[in-house]
Image: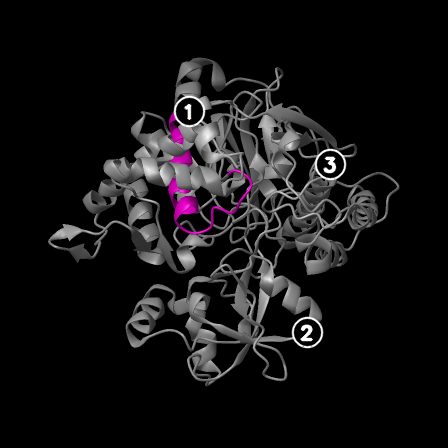
Amino acid sequence: MAATTWDMGFAPEDDCDLTLSTDVLVIGGGPAAAWAAWSAATSGAKVVVVDKGYLGSSGAAAASGNGVLTVPPAERPEVLIQRYRQGNGLGNPRWIERVLECTWQSMPLLDEWGYKFPRENGEPARKSFYGPEYMRVIRRRLLALGVRILDQSPALELLVDRDGVVAGARGLQRQENRRYSVRAGAVVLATGGCSFLSNALGCNVNTGDASLMAVEAGAELSSMEFSAQYAISSAVNATATRGVPYAWATYTDADGNDLGGIEGGRRRDDFLATALLKGPVFARLDKATPDIRAVIEKSHFIAFLPLRKAGIDPYTQRFPVTLVLEGTVRGVGGVRLTSDDCAASVPGLYAAGDAATREFLAGAASGGGGPNAAWAISSGRWAGAGAARFALALRSDASDRPLRATGQVGLRPAEGKQKFDSDAIIKGVQDELFPLDKNYFRTGVGLITSLQKLDSLWREVRCTPRVDDPRSIERSRTAAALVAAGRWTYRAGLERRETRSLNRRTDFPHTDPAQRHYQVTGGLDEIWIRREPVENIPDYSHSAVA
């Protein structure tokens, strides 16, 4: 690298070793990023993709099989109402319908690109896909369209012009040991959500980068309080967060006593979290019939690998289980969307997938599984097309704009300030976000106490980062992003004084109809909260909202 520090400036290409210019820059490497790149490219835009991993293996979708919410038109009214009810009053029927239609129209494209769906009655069964093959097919399609992909190239900050319009990004390429800058007519953020480095399946690349970059550029976030999404995993290797096999589980305590937890014919949502706060919990998948075993082992094979490796038969032997935080990856919060084409609240910026708020589709609940996969496809397509339209409209004016880098935290030395320890910062964030009695079950007192600790960590990341090499630069930036995400999450959780789906307040245990609104948040040193009304759609509000 040419230097060991990064200087803010009005011409941020000057200290970069690689400079590129494009119409649309897509940041990320999962399904949403890939669909955004495809959509932008087929809209006539020149496209560059930068990803901190490898487009094809990045993120949760590439790590295993994925269900997809693909619904034939005749079945949509029932599914729409069901999804709306699950969102606890904060979903948007119009957006749900848009996602169902866009996903239905998109899945046949995978056939055309070479993905081999299994066949039922002679027809392709497009209800799920095998993650690695799915991503391999899309990557191959993007390259055929001329999309330039920079793997192992995390973006660290956005660029804006004099009017505050987002106009590119810059970052570093680990393998080439150099910095890069991409000047673009528009940018799509699709870096995934934030799981706070919990080791949840495929999620350790999801560190809240998009939220920090967006807020630094002036954008807003929404529904960050609905982020306390945890998923079950065997404690043998607490990374394979797959919940479906556990539908056929019996749970016992350390002494072998059945923990029950069944009410009204189904297990309580908070059963496992409550049990784990009392002591170790063990599972045995003894209710799975041979036919069921064949299905779940095929579709969720990744959940069985650690058990097989440890010599455990999950159908006859007990094994310890735990809950792993997935944060906004399967939760809701993210960059606030202001239009049908997934534009953010600053011009030139778009968001897709887990990086964007999923509130219109999932409401206050998790969209884990099929809905999330459908959201990645749909929001990716809309964001890519929107970014292309924006960029192509100003193509002749985009190339010579003076630009300014927007990164404010964890990138540059602060004069007179000591260097902070990124690993210690990350550990401090996880100490406040991981525990079930702090995040899964929230109280006002607990949130205030955690916010005080997170605010202290924020003051530390406002000091001097270690910028000696690419790894230390990226680690410093990751630490800053995690602290920021934790503060936005808990500040929004404190403001919402009710229990509504993924915001579980034990001091406000009931859902308050008067709080049926979205919470928009932003700010770096001073975090603010603003209420936004839910779009009133009478045809659905009477039939679907309790």
Residue type highlighted by circle 3: Glu
Q: Quadrant of residue 401?
A: top right
Residue type highlighted by circle 2: Gly
Direction from residue 227 to residue 140 in the image, left or right: left
Direction from residue 185 to residue 506 in the image, left or right: right
Is residue 29 in sight in this rendering? yes
Main secondary structure found in the magenta portion: helix
Sequence-first tag of 2 and 1: 2
Q: Which residue is mark 3?
A: 495
Q: Could you tell me residue 122's position as x and y percent? A: 11, 53
Q: Tag 3's secondary structure? A: helix
Tell me the number on the disc at residue 279.
Answer: 2
Tell me the number on the disc at residue 539.
Answer: 1
Is residue 33 in sight in this rendering? no
Q: Could you tell me residue 210's position as x and y percent? A: 58, 39
CA separation in Å, label 3 and label 2: 31 Å
Direction from residue 199 to residue 480 in the image, left or right: right
Q: Which portion, as a residue range, is magenta?
A: 363-386
- Which residue occupies 72% across, 35% down? 408
Q: Tell which of 378 and 473 is nearer to you.
A: 378
Judge whether residue 16 is colored magenta. Answer: no
Q: Is 36 above or below relative to 452?
A: above
Q: Tag 1's secondary structure? A: helix
Instruction: Kindly give the residue lying farthest to the front in the view shown.
Output: 264
Judge whether residue 375 is colored magenta. Answer: yes
CA separation in Å, label 1 and label 3: 30 Å
Find out whether the residues at labels 1 and 3 contact each other: C-beta distance under 8 Å: no
Q: Could you tell me residue 348's position as x and y percent? A: 51, 23
Sequence-first tag of 3 and 2: 2
User: Dot 3: within a 10 Å radius of its alpha carbon, few (fewer than 14), some, or many (20 or more) residues?
Assistant: some
- Which residue occupies 52% across, 28% down? 337
Residue type highlighted by circle 1: Asp
